[in-house]
Image: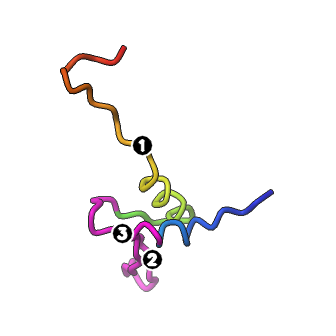
Amino acid sequence: MMLVPWRLIALAFGWRTSFRLEGAHPRLVIHHKRHADRLAGADAWKRAALVSIRAPDFVNPKGRSSS
């Protein structure tokens, strides 16, 4: 099984780290200046990379549904 370097991928897309104090313990938070999302938790780097590489939703220029 190949390990995916989620942190390196997310850093390449411009995601950065910060820390937020929750009580006496600092919590790692992943953020991006162009995204409103703030991600935290064990899989934050993975979710940040997937947000960056997700294909945008298709919008039909004539206003019709694509179905």
The local crowd at label 3, few if under 14, some if 14 to 19, many if 20 or more residues have their Cα within 10 Å, is many
Identified at 33% across, 59% down, the residue is 37
Foreground: disc 2 or disc 1 = 1
Foreground: disc 2 or disc 3 = 3
Q: Residue 55 — which label?
A: 1
Closer to us: 31 or 34: 34
Identified at 47% across, 70% down, the residue is 12
Q: Residue 33 — which label?
A: none
> What span is colored magenta in the figure?
12-37
Amino acid type, callout 2: Arg
Image quarter where the C terminus lies is top left
* Protein image colouring: rainbow
Identified at 29% across, 60% down, the residue is 35
Image quarter where the N terminus lies is bottom right
Q: Measured along the vertical axis of the image, is residue 57 above or below residue 40?
A: above
- On the image, the x and y values in percent for residue 32 come to 33, 68
Q: Residue furthest right?
A: 1
Closer to us: 44 or 25: 44
Q: Residue furthest top?
A: 67
Q: Say whether residue 33 is left or right of residue 55.
A: left
- On the image, the x and y values in percent for residue 6 come to 58, 65
Asked if the magenta segment contains residue 29, the reply would be yes
Q: Secondary structure at mark 2?
A: strand
| Total residue callouts | 3
Amino acid type, callout 3: His
Residue behind mark 2: 27
Q: Residue 31 — which label?
A: 3
Q: Secondary structure at mark 3?
A: strand
Q: Residue furthest left?
A: 62
> Along the polypeptide, which appears first: circle 2 or circle 1?
2
